[in-house]
Every structure is written in structure tokens, then in C-alpha cells.
Amino acid sequence: MRRPYISATFSILCATTAMPAFAQTAEADDQAFEGDIIVTAQKREERLVDVPVTISAVSQARLEELGVSDLDELANYIPGLNVQEQSANNPGIVIRGITSDSGSAQQAARVTLYYNGVDISRSRGSYQDIYDVERIEVIKGPQATLFGTASAVGAISIISARPKPGFSGALTAGIGNYDQRLLTGNLNLGSDIIAGRVAFAYKKRDGYVNNLAPNQDDLNGQDQLGVRGSLRYTPNDALTADLILTYDRQRNPGTAFVSRALPTASGPGDPFGDAYLGGSSRSLQDLYQAELGLTRDVYDANFIVNYEFADNWALTMVNGYRKFDSLEVFDADGSAAEYLEFTELAKGDQFNHETRFAYTDNNFRGSFGFNFFHENSIQNVPFSTNERVFFACLTSTAATRAQCVAPNGSVPAQALPPVPYSSVFENKGRNDSYSMFADGTWIPTPKLEITAGARVLIEKRRSGFFARVPRSAVTGGASVVPGQIDTGGQTFRTEDSFAAVLPRFNLLYRFSDNFNGYATVSKGRRSATVQLGARTTPTGPAANFTPVLAENIWNYEVGLKGAVGIFSGSIGAYYLTYDNFQVSVVLPNGTTQTQSAGTATNKGVEAELTIKPTSWLSIFGNIGYIDGGIDDKPTIAANFRGAKFRLQPEVQASGGFTINAPLGGVTFFATPSVTYRSSMFFEIPNNPVTSQDAVTLVNVNAGFRFGGDRFEISAFARNLLNEDYLLDAGNTGGAFGIPTFIPAEPRLYGIRVGAKF
């Protein structure tokens, strides 16, 4: 599947073992050491080099240098981070080999995504466009006391740009292949007391997978709009209040779940060729929408207050509300057969409040407070099929696939009078978490800082389940899909409560002002799953409660970060252990169930390096090595034993350089880069059929700024060598013996023009 691009260029770039990931701002460009950049990962402003955990931070300016406009593109430049966006409705976020992508309303996230300090991790509501941000911080490992919902294995914190005094703005427009269109901008107006800012981003692109179905658009396209309004009130130096309102919208065409086993009119099934995804002839009646694709709306409100009082004290209150409503229709069999046609309707709302007090003096820093988080969500999954086609495809084998889809791409059973069938199941989750936390840092000498803290967490998790499953008109059986159970019009419900104590311990030693060592021990936790379904009994349907214990993680980490001369960077090593490691398994009826795979371990090394030999040249590189998976023990189920984590490459690296060269009134800038990712599995249990070989990609962003750097014209290319590789494999079709494959982006290129005022 892959061509081995291990080029001399890539070898040179990665020989320094490192990364680009320190944030840059206009002020940071003049600093001798990028570690001087200020971050707030520990809920206070401090230099990146002084944070005793592994953290990468990227500013809006750096995103523009790299040509990055989405989180999945950013992941190429952060060691230990992968983001799989098979659609905006289903992003898979991976930190150090651990994935968080379940759509179930009953399951908690592992990797926590924060937007302006508020947890937005519920998978179907978590996608957030990254236009006009102040910075993005990626914090590795459990951070029990820092964030309101106690990130289990790591966190991504997106911090939007705040209003500031004065009048300023920017506008960027772009076009590219596949009819790409881009329009982004911001407008800022204000005084020292009150300031406002409006920002937006509109992105549209045709699908890059040709869909032969006459009633559908091409697949894997993009049509999204994001708008944000911010208001900052600063009546004096002690008080700052921010109100941030955000709206995100997607109207994307269908996702390309392409079958390799079932042919099209263009020839044998090919994930990188044409597809024929026609959906259901009863899509509007059964699946709530006439065509394949995503309709998604997200509304978000943040109100944040910072108040400094009594010399050494500060109070921060973070309030957030988020509502999402998404509907995605998809063709899960990946062929012209009206076989496995589904919708996922996900709705939810979330509310968060945190109050944090902080104290600082020369020998001690500390914070304490409380947090409340509430979410209420559903996942509704209707199914539509033609029973004649369903049974023809379900009973076919590799030798008899022509009875499902013929070699010419036709579907024999669809020539007969149709027998339509539809069913639906829905899981519900209503979760409340209450926590108190305290954290203190003792500074016995200027060279040494010792931190200890803990969060006490109490959860109440409520789950519900409903299913409407008619009998088969062809067989007379209880269901067309084996294992689906009708709840007889009832919604089953159950609930449970849990408590936990999550500590962290950090040590920071200053070898010099710009070179530090650190060590950390911390505990993370993924909430128990109150998993509810249905079962049959002699007296009728009944609730089927299959709880899954909380997943507990211990993280041990040591590292160095700092600068020597023209070199700056970091290196860290970590070891994690997991009890009750939770995995999501697709069952033969197409539903997903959470199961405990027992114990697991994960160890690795991450390194980043920036070399700045001149004021106009910066060379960067990064590498991450991960050796993780489920333990190989006799007590673990055979299908899980020794399995590698899903979406976990053993080696991930990138390298490149950035040029900002003044040329007599014009500045030439360019950032070419190479990224490498070793092979990985898409599923647990591991299956070579649903895996991806090593991938090497080349990206470039370059152009000119002029008029005092107020105007810009640039060109970009992603996947410059047009490599064929997979974004995902297996999926719902895999549960029925015909895994589907989602191709990743081909070569995308275009030009952009921008102006700042």
C-alpha cells in the first residue's frame, strides 16, 4: 500500500531528534529562547520552560507559518499527538497512543478537549475549528488538579484570541484544488476598559472521493462556518471579565466508507478509487435526511472572571455552556447495495462552573477550589435496509460476493420488488461530577520547586436505552439484524455513583535560568461506564446492565527542557500503567460495546528541538516513540492479549525549517516540512487487514509579506507527493464481515491572500 519515502531530506531534518512545538507570538520572535513564552497550563501564567510537565504550545502565528488550519494537521507537529478526523462528527483524539472517540452517551472521554477552560470532550460535540486562537496547549499525562474534569491521559486546551485595546483587523481569502474556498478574518475595537472582537472562518471544499451514485455528492468534502464574538471588560488592573460566544456549523457531504471487497462499475473495490455510496431509497423516511452527509450545529458560551485581591491572592471563575446537535447519514457497507444504511443523531448540552483561588509569594504558590460539570446527551441510531439485499449480502462469502454486488457493480437483489425495513436504538447519558481540588508548590530554594496536589471527585452517572426493532418480513424472525432487541416501547434506565481521589506530584530543578529538569507522578481516571442495553427474557424484554469499572492510570515521567546557545527544546520519558483498560468493540449487530481488557502498559520518549542559527532561519524537528498495548497475560481475554493500542504508531516524527527573510521591503517566508508515522492498527483486537503501513508526507507553506508586513500572498501544499494512505478502516461494515476503508486527503494545494490593518 505504501511507497517507502525515507529520503535524505527527512534523515537530515530528524537527525536532531526534535520538534517545533514551542509557541510563538509577535513578542516571542525577538526572544533568545522560545521557552520564555507564557502559557497557562497550570492555571497561572508562567514560562513554558518552568512548567514541570510535558507540554507543547503553538500560537496562531506559528499555525500560519506551518499552514495549519485544523487540529488533525497540527498533530503532525506535536510528538505523541494524533487526531483522526473521519468527520467533524467523529474526531478521534489520541495522546500517547490512547484514543478518545466513542460516540456513546454512556461513555466518558479519555483525552480531554478544553475550549477556553471548559471541557467539551463529548465526542460528537467536541470538534472545534481553530481560527483566531491565542494558542493551543497540548498537555501530556494525567493532570488531576489543573482542569475541571481531571484529564485522564492528557488534554488539548484551545484558547481563543481575546479583545485588546485599539482598532485592528485581518482578512484572508484563498482558493485551491477540489474547488477549495477559504475566507477568515477578525475585527478588534476597544479601549483599556472595554474591548470587543469578532472572528469568523468559512471553509468549503468538494469531496476528493468520486461518488458514482447519481443522487449523492462526492465524498469527504467540507462545508463549515465558525463565528465567534468576544467582549472583555477591564475596569481596573485587578479585574478582568471575558464573555465569549461561539457558533460552529458543518454541512459536509458524506464520509467515504469504501468497501474493498465489493466492486463498483469502475472495477474492483478500491479505497483510493471511485465509490458508489447511494444510501437508502427511504433515507428521508427512515434516516431523517435525504442524502448522505453531516448536518451539525454547535453553540458555546463562556464567561470568565479573573480578580486579583489582597496583594497575593487571585480568584478565577470559569463558566461554560455548550449545546450540540448533529445528524450524520452514512452508507456503512461501502457499496451500491442498499444493505447497511445508518444515521447517527447526537444531541447534548453541557454546563461547567469552576471557582479557583490562587495564592503566590516568593516561597509558595497554591490554589484550591471546586468544580461542577453536568452533561445530558443522547445517541440515536436508525437503520434502513432492503431485506432482499440484506440477506443476499449477509449470507454471501468471498466466493459468492456476486450475489451481493456483481462484478459490474450492479446489485441483483435490487432488481426485485423491495422489502423495506428500518429499526432504531438510542442510548442516553446524564452525568454530573462534583469535585474539590487543592494544589501547592513549595520553593525552598530558587533552584527547587516541589508540587503536590489532589482532586476529590464524586460522580453520578445515569443511563437510558430504547430500541424499536420490528420483526423481519422475509424470515419472520425477531429482527433483521442478529442480536437487536426491541424494548417494547419502554426506555430502560439505571444509575450509579462513584468517587475517586486523584493526586499529582511534581519536582522542578533549575540548572540555570533557561534549563530545567522535572519529574512527575500523577494519577488519571476514565469514569466507569454505566452501560445499559436490552435482553430477552421469557416474559419479554428487560434491561441489560453490564457495568465496566473505572479505568485507572498511573503516570511516571522525567524530562529536561531548556536552551543552550542556538539550541532550545525538550526531552521526556514516561511510563504508564492501566487497570481495567476500556476498549470499544463493534458487535455483530453493528452496535458498539465497552469492555474491560484488563491491564495495559505504555512507555515512550518524546523529544523536541529548535535550532536558530540566524534571526531569519529556524530549524525544527520532533520525534515520539511509543511502546504500548494490552498486557500479554493469561488472565486477559485471548482476543485482547498483547494487542497494540488503536491508532498508535510506534514512531512519529516531523522536521523542517522556517525562513523569515527580509528582502528590501518584502519578506520572504517559507516552512517546508516532512512528517513520518510508522504503521498502526485501526482496531482492537488488532487485524492486519484493518491497519496502515508507514506514511511519509511532505507539506509546504511559502509566500511574501509586504507593505510593512500588512499584506501577504502565499501558496501551500499538503501531501505534496500525493501519497495514498488510510484515515480509518474496519468501521461498522467490519462487524458484518466487510470492513470499509476511509482514504485520507490526497494532494491539496492552493493560494491565499491576506491583509492586516
Image: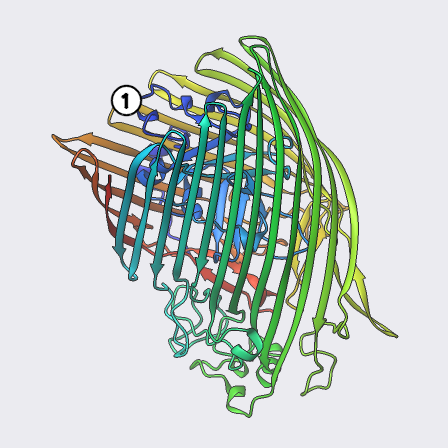
- Furthest residue toward left: 664
Q: Is residue 305 left or right of residue 746?
A: right
Q: Quadrant of the C terminus?
A: top left
Q: Residue at x 42, y 82 (%)?
A: 408
- Furthest residue toward right: 539
Is 377 rendered above or below residue 391?
above
Which residue lies under the disc numbered 1? 613
Q: Residue at x 39, y 62 (%)?
A: 221
Where on the picture, by quarter, is residue 616?
Answer: top left
- Furthest residue toward bottom: 417
Q: Residue 373: x and y, percent?
A: 65, 43
Pick the front one: 710 or 96: 710
Is 256 rendered above or below residue 187?
below
Q: Residue at x 45, y 65 (%)?
A: 256
Is 397 rendered above or below residue 178?
below
Secondary structure at numbered mark 1 = strand
Instruction: Check disc 1: other Cα within 10 Å, few if <14, some if 14-19, many if 20+.
Output: few
Q: Residue 42: x and y, percent?
A: 55, 27
Pick the front one: 278 or 724: 278
Q: Residue 726: x and y, percent?
A: 45, 56
Residue 689 shows in the view: no
Q: Residue 753: x and y, percent?
A: 22, 47
Where on the picture, by quarter, is residue 464?
Answer: bottom right
The mark total stands at 1
Where on the picture, by quarter, is residue 268?
Answer: bottom left
- Furthest residue toward top: 445
Pick the front one: 381 or 745: 381
Q: Kindly identify the amino acid type of the residue bearing the numbered disc 1.
A: Pro
Q: Residue at x 70, y 76 (%)?
A: 469
